[in-house]
Image (cartoon, helix red, strand yellow):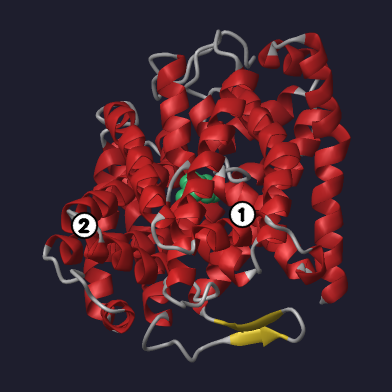
Amino acid sequence: MSSEFRLSIHGQWSGRLAFFLAATGSAVGLGNIWKFPYITGENGGGAFVIVYLICIAIIGVPIMMAEIMLGRRGRLSPINTMALLTSEDNRHKIWRAIGWMGAIAGLIILSYYSVIAGWAMAYVVRMASGVFLASTTDGVNGIFTALTADPERLLAWHTIFMLLTTMIVARGVQHGLERAVRYLMPLLFVMLLILVGYATSTGAFLQGVNYLFSADFSKLSTESVVVAMGHAFFTLSLGMGAIMAYGAYLPKDVSIAKTSFAIAAADTLVALLAGMAIFPIVFANALEPAAGPGLIFQTLPIAFGQMDAGTLFGTVFFVLLVFAALTSAISLIEPMVAWLVENKNVTRIQAAVYMGLAAWVLGIGSILSFNVWSNVTWSIPGLFKDLTIFDTLDGLTANIMLPLGGLFIAIFAGHLMAEHKVKDEIQTHPTLYKVWFYLIRYVTPLLVIIVFLNLIKLI
Ligand code: TRP
């Protein structure tokens, strides 16, 4: 079987814009607006942000190009794409693990991602009811604590979010989704600009921006570097096959290089805007930047509570955040769903339901780690302290499985696949191609390995 001249059985994007929107929809999500600000706060600000930006540029973008390239070459689910490409070039079966590990990582990420998306849904209702109007820091805090302390409410929202995700995936990627992303993403961007505008009025805008961009590398720990690299993978949806799966539906004439730059740029811009909105609010209200996963839920309501028409803006903002999460969530199970359809003689609807159910069950562990099981933790002395189930699932996937997947993808694309095929797919300016090939062959894998070795040294 040859990988040339085939189309995916799952369909194809209508064109370049559709792919850009879908991939950006996957990339832009809770990772940008919820996770980026809180891990920046936990890791001390500027220096962490710089390392993250470097990782995006020299690890993220090259791997994104490689993933799209592999996907479009294989035109199958990531598991079967990797099986096809390894057998075409007579490579060891072990490289198929890229597909398998990725599928498992996607399922684990989705399980806790859905729980946090549930918080955002809960906040739509709270915002709309006006409870945050002129509320104090303590009041906002209390509302967040009450939500996360209640496993039943969290389970209800988690269930609703998983149902929505499953329904969209069941209908096929193109229907509705392309359209939703087209209008909702730009709107989310506008809402972020409004929030940054508010942040300039808090009196702590410069302090917030300074925190985000002025780097003191002496404060940077090895763990922070690992988290920064892990987040570069997480925020660009790399290392598990999501982008590979989307690449399988990409028309042949679209430039992989240009699209990858555009996706990475859009994703980074959204994350930085979120940071510029949130940190001024943190400092203006004497909050703690290292507050953890609750950070945006404890800061943004203060802003919305104080601004004109805050109830409206706040409601719209959290609705958009839920949509951003949905367009990411679907890409987390698409690889598994596509594989089930290809191999197990099930319909797309059945496949989506099975995977949705699996992620739903797994998510219950994360729900409980915010309340009933919040004391069930473990530590590695000197490295990780008091990790809950949620922390463990997040750390294991973002900081270990995704970079490992990315490393294997880089090695496969840079060393194991016949180069004429790689060149034929990437099709870009010769110099640009050379730079990319050099990065993916040497620089990117080496950097990932160095970060990993430092991690191992610490253990
Ligand atoms: N990138 C998304 C975010 O930032 C999350 C996500 C979607 C993801 N698909 C992924 C993360 C695949 C890792 C791998 O919210």
- On the picture, is 441 further left or further right than 224? right
Q: Is residue 302 above or below residue 171?
A: below
Residue 252 vs residue 206, the one in the foreground: 206
Amino acid identity at mark 1: His
- Residue 152 placement (x, y as % from top left): 23, 78
Q: Is residue 219 above or below residue 169?
A: below
Amino acid identity at mark 2: Gly
Tell me whether the residue at label 2 lies in contact with that at label 1, contact meaning CB atoms closer than 8 angstroms: no
Asked whether residue 350 appears in the rendered view, the answer is yes
Q: Is residue 136 above or below residue 194?
A: below
Judge: label 2 CB < 8 Å from ligand 1: no
Q: Give the residue pinned by disc 1.
A: 231
Image quarter of the C terminus: bottom right
Residue 114 vs residue 123, the one in the foreground: 123
Image quarter of the N terminus: top right
Residue 83 in which image quadrant: top right
Secondary structure of the residue carrying numbered label 2: helix
- Residue 288 placement (x, y as % from top left): 50, 77
- Residue 405 placement (x, y as % from top left): 68, 47
Decide which of tag 2 and tag 1 comes sooner along the chain: 1
Secondary structure of the residue carrying numbered label 1: helix
Q: Give the residue pinned by disc 2.
A: 310
Residue 85 vs residue 448, the one in the foreground: 448
Residue 117 vs residue 410, the one in the foreground: 117
